[in-house]
Amino acid sequence: MKALEGIKVLDFTHVQSGPTCTQLLAWFGADVIKVERPGVGDATRKQLVDVPGADSLYFTMLNHNKRSIELNSKNETGKEVLTRLIEICDVMVENFAPGALDRMGFSWERIQEINPRIILASIKGFGPGKYEDCKVYENVAQCAGGSASTTGFHDGPPLVTGAQVGDSGTGLHLCLGIVTALYQRESSGRGQKVSAAMQDGVLNLARVKLRDQQRLARGPLTEYSQHGEGIPFGEATPRAGNDSGGGQPGRILKCRGWETDPNAYTYFITQAAAWTQVCEVIGEPEWKTKEGYATPPERLDKLNEIFERIEQWTMTKTKFEVMEICNPRNIPVGPILSMKELMEDEGLRETGTIVDVEHPERGTYVSVGCPIKLSDSPVDVIRSPLLGEHTQEVLAGDLGYRGDDLMRVLESGAVGDVNKEAAE
Ligand code: CAO
């Protein structure tokens, strides 16, 4: 028994934000039926192709454990099939451009008419307001949600991050909204509309920077390196380089091998409680009690000197040796791990966070498995579906189309090239 067993999801999502959400629902046990445009499918199937003729990693890594049906939702018979899918599904998820679902003839009012128990979950770039009609991609969301203005160094331009906080982050938010709405349906008996805007999701993840915006009105942000360096603050939360966001001074420091290895670095936090241990480890025991060094406020204008000294030490060790030495002493450090190292990490493979997946077109590829572990609902990662792989199965098995009725749909141009002889 899986946590969401018995829940059927009409997955009308594409690209990254929506598919990350429905992939999680599928991993939790929901039956996810991905509806794709005939002959084309989700645009990511053919984006960043690395194996000619095969679905891309972009698609396969975001669409595990789903079924795929080809369906033209603008064709009359296609609309009929979509209506029947809405009738049998508990949840419908979409991340089309604003208004696209209405233009197809499936407004929230119409969807509720078809199935009052259905939960309609939507991702858009922006919530209601002046930007509500905009199409939005990851980096636009990172910029509009406050992440970019607070990422980077204070003397450099805004930066976007590698973590897809706009797309995958909003997919996570939406997923939580869906399971919450499913829970409320238990008592209300009704579905509801769940909306997650990418700007809102990014801002939620950048919450501590809005905290700092308000603190700034009351005085300088003393834990920012910029303060210790005597650089005045402007009106808005500045970019803080690699400073730690929690008020404890932290930096990324070079480790042994940095000259040739771009990831031979460690994160190092000089947490107040670990200061004496830091002084011991780096060979500056007198700093424990020395005036100007002994307490966190005294150290603020010396952070560059202090971290340079710590770096002299970290440069004599590998990033893993730094961790082995510092961890037992409660000094918070973390190696900068490359994607190559993560992909080969045995611990992550044992927990199913990194998995090998077999695919008929591409052979074996590596993917990120489900990052959320439920003790009573284990996840088996199943390869993504080929385009339209389950069209016939869904039409006949789930929707009950049979005989002439099935032939009518297959010949209507609403679905892709299904083997009609086999269907007969
Ligand atoms: N059958 C028939 N038509 C279909 C269809 C199907 N199965 N699936 C989609 N379509 C149609 C849509 O109805 C739409 O038609 P109209 O323009 O006539 O309404 C058309 O395909 C294009 O859909 P779209 O506008 O959503 O796609 P796009 O590539 O132009 O824009 C994106 C992509 C992501 C910018 C936009 O969908 C969007 O802003 N989504 C919301 C925010 C979001 O999720 N962004 C993150 C994406 S991941 O980086």
Image (tube, rainbow, N blue to C red):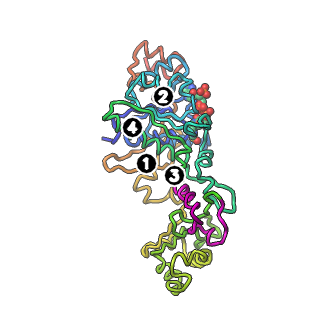
Which tag is nearer the camera, tag 4 or tag 2?
4
- Mark 3 secondary-structure assignment: helix
- First-in-chain label (2 vs 3): 2
Q: Tell me the residue that label 3 is attached to.
A: 205
Type of amino acid at the residue the image marks with label 4: Ala
Which tag is nearer the camera, tag 1 or tag 4?
4
Q: Tell me the residue that label 2 is attached to.
A: 69
- Report how far apart the C-alphas of labels 4 and 2 lie in the structure: 26 Å
Residue toward you, 326 or 261? 326
Type of amino acid at the residue the image marks with label 2: Ile
Q: Quadrant of the N terminus?
A: top left
Q: Tell me the residue that label 4 is attached to.
A: 181
Which tag is nearer the camera, tag 3 or tag 1?
3
- Give the image location of residue 13, x and y in percent: 51, 35
- Report how far apart the C-alphas of labels 2 and 3 lie in the structure: 34 Å
Q: Which residues are magenta?
A: 206-234
Q: How many C-alpha atoms fall within 10 Å of the one at disc 1: few (<14), some, or many (≥20)?
A: many
Type of amino acid at the residue the image marks with label 3: Leu
Res 40 → quadrant: top right
Type of amino acid at the residue the image marks with label 1: Cys
- First-in-chain label (4 vs 2): 2
Above or below 331: residue 393:
above
Q: Are marks 3 and 1 in contact (CB under 8 Å)?
A: no
